[in-house]
Image (cartoon, rainbow, N blue to C red):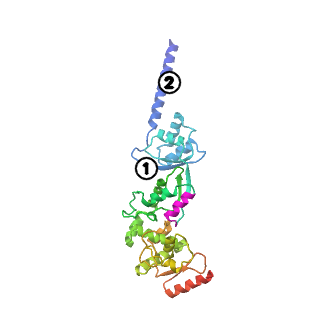
């Protein structure tokens, strides 16, 4: 009789402990903050233990306590099944959701660099040549696709030049299966990150639209080799605009030609095209390339100079010779031609 009672008590104790364990696991399988749906990027490196992963999740603000995640993983059988990768997680996810995502493995990401100074057409070609996108599909979307961003003007004209300036040059980790629309929106999202509200306010202060600032930045990008000279080139552009002078920038003619020529001919500079700043006053209709952040900053914060001219210097080190006097400009130009044997 006593033995039977002991067995019953033991069974009741086991049941109670099981219920307590179940309740505890259910209790810790909760979200940190159901109202916080912001996505955090959590990087889990190869060889990470469950403890390492739990600590990364806690530090990333996805879970409340690393200890709870470790215990949950142990009791629910996830321990040892987590995979390395980059994960998009949120504090509004419960632990089971997080555990399932990490055991399934992340989408394979491939790094790809878009350098500064390319046109949308050149970006599409680069992506196509590297097997990242179909050229025709990319250009069709870039020329007339629907993209809802505050920085894109409502009257943005359709055509190949439409997104010039807005596809931000950077190194991206595109998912392996990213389509053309995803690639374009990723680049537009990146532009939205780097072109800050302070920059937009500065553009208004200067009296220019965001697209006009990008047009100036794109000319700076294509005219300048040395980063420290970008604000100087910017000052020349503003000084010429303010004085009512044609910009006469070789880069705008090269944009029309679709090629980078070291020396332009008279016929080149006489091409009747709105982008030809030799014969049309003011800024060209839009950006001539997608500039990097240094050129954008230079467009927003030009150096304070009286320079009206610049030409590649006779040093042939990528630097420019700047001047405010036309005769000095001609002398600098002759020195350059002599240096290159022209």
Q: Which of pointers 2 and 1 lies earlier in the amino acid sequence?
A: 2
In the rendered image, which quarter is residue 147 located in? bottom left
Q: Position of residue 105 (x, y in %)?
A: 54, 43
Q: Which residue is mark 1?
A: 38
Figure disc tally: 2
Query: Disc 2 to disc 1, how far (Cα)?
Result: 42 Å
Asked if residue 116 lies in the magenta stretch, the reply is: no
Q: Which residue is mark 2?
A: 14
Is residue 39 visible from the viewing direction of this image? yes
Q: Position of residue 265 (x, y in %)?
A: 54, 79
- Along the line of sight, the residue nearer the viewer: 57 or 318: 318
Is residue 188 visible from the viewing direction of this image? no
Outermost residue, top direction? 1
Q: Which residues are magenta?
A: 117-129
Pointer 2 with pointer 1, Cβ within 8 A = no
- The residue that appears at 45% across and 49% down in the rendered structure is 39
Q: Callout 2: helix, strand or loop?
A: helix
Label 1: few (<14), some or many (≥20) within 10 Å? few
- The residue that appears at 54% across and 34% down in the rendered structure is 77
Is 28 rendered above or below residue 201? above
- Along the line of sight, the residue nearer the viewer: 335 or 78: 335
Q: Position of residue 220 (x, y in %)?
A: 49, 72
State left or right for residue 85 relative to residue 300: right
- The residue that appears at 40% across and 79% down in the rendered structure is 242
Asked if residue 124 lies in the magenta stretch, the reply is: yes
The mark found on residue 306 in the picture is none
Give the main secondary structure, helix, strand or loop, of the magenta stretch. helix
């Amino acid at each position: 009789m006593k033995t039977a009672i002991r067995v019953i008590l033991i069974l009741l104790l086991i049941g109670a402990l099981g219920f307590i364990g179940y309740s505890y696991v259910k209790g810790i399988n909760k979200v940190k903050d159901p109202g916080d749906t912001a996505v955090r990027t959590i990087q889990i490196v190869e060889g990470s233990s469950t403890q390492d992963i739990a600590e990364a999740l806690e530090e990333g603000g996805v879970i409340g306590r690393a200890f709870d995640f470790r215990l949950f993983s142990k009791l629910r059988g996830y321990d040892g099944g987590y995979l390395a990768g980059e994960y998009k997680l949120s504090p509004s996810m419960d632990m089971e959701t997080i555990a399932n995502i990490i055991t399934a493995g992340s989408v394979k990401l491939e790094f790809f660099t878009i350098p500064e100074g390319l046109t949308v057409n050149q970006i599409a070609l680069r992506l196509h040549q590297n097997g990242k996108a179909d050229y025709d599909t990319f250009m069709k979307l870039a020329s007339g696709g629907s993209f809802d961003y505050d920085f894109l003007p409502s009257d943005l004209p359709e055509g190949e030049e439409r997104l010039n300036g807005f596809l931000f040059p950077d190194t991206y980790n595109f998912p392996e299966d990213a389509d053309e629309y995803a690639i374009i929106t990723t680049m537009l999202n990146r532009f939205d990150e780097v072109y800050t509200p302070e920059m937009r306010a500065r553009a208004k202060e200067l009296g220019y639209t965001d697209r006009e600032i990008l047009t100036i930045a794109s000319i700076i990008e294509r005219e300048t080799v040395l980063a420290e000279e970008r604000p100087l080139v910017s000052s020349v552009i503003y000084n010429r605009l303010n004085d009512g002078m044609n910009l006469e920038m070789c880069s705008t003619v090269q944009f029309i030609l679709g090629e980078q020529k070291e020396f332009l001919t008279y016929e080149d500079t006489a091409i009747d095209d709105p982008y030809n700043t030799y014969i049309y006053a003011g800024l060209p209709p839009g950006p001539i390339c997608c500039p990097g952040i240094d050129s954008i900053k230079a467009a927003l914060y030009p150096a304070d100079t009286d320079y009206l001219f610049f030409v590649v210097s006779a040093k042939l080190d990528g630097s420019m010779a700047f001047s405010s006097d036309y005769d000095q400009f001609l002398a600098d130009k002759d020195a350059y031609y002599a240096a290159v044997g022209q």
